[in-house]
Amino acid sequence: MPRAPRASVGGVCYHAINRGNGRRQVFHKDGDYQAFLKAIGHACVEIPMPVLGFCLMPNHFHLVLLPKADGDLSRWMHWVQNTHVRRYHQHHKTSGHLWQGRGRPKKAAE
């Protein structure tokens, strides 16, 4: 049975976080960080999303996002993480799960 979609309301600020599967490192060098930022940029073109802040750590990331419409957050996060995983596997010659889950967005005030 597929997972239920997460509710994300437009016009509400969210703090999104995800970490490497098994808490493993996902950013090994500057190019990995740059590729993730490039994926964020491409996602913002496809699904306009103000990125108010971010912090990329070796094994996880934090993003502060403000989706414009209901449902944009899930589609945008999927775009970013999926794009990054494909690039990561191609570059590092790996396969399997990279991220621990589909991310944990919370309303920024929570």
Image: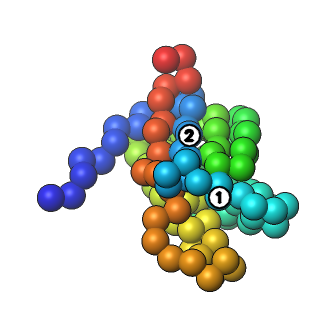
Residue, far right: 30
Q: Is residue 60 above or below residue 92?
A: above
Residue, far top: 109
Which residue is tagged 2? Answer: 17
On the question of residue 71 being in view, the answer is: yes
**Type of amino acid under label 2:** Ile
In the image, residue 71 lies at what x, y percent? Answer: 41, 46
**Type of amino acid under label 1:** Val
N-terminal label among 2 and 1: 2
Q: Residue at x 46, y 65 (%)?
A: 97
Q: Residue at x 64, y 39 (%)?
A: 62
In the image, residue 94 lies at what x, y percent? Answer: 57, 78
Q: Residues within 10 Å of mark 1 (few under 14, many from 20)?
A: many
Q: Residue at x 63, y 46 (%)?
A: 60
Q: Which mark is residue 45?
A: none
Q: Secondary structure at mark 2?
A: strand
Which residue is tagged 1? Answer: 26
User: Is 36 positioned to the left or the right of 104 in the image?
Assistant: right
Which sits in the foreground, 55 or 69? Answer: 55
Q: Is residue 41 above or below residue 10?
A: below
Q: Residue at x 64, y 49 (%)?
A: 59
In the image, residue 31 lies at what x, y percent? Answer: 81, 66
Find residue 91 and report its image quarter. Answer: bottom right
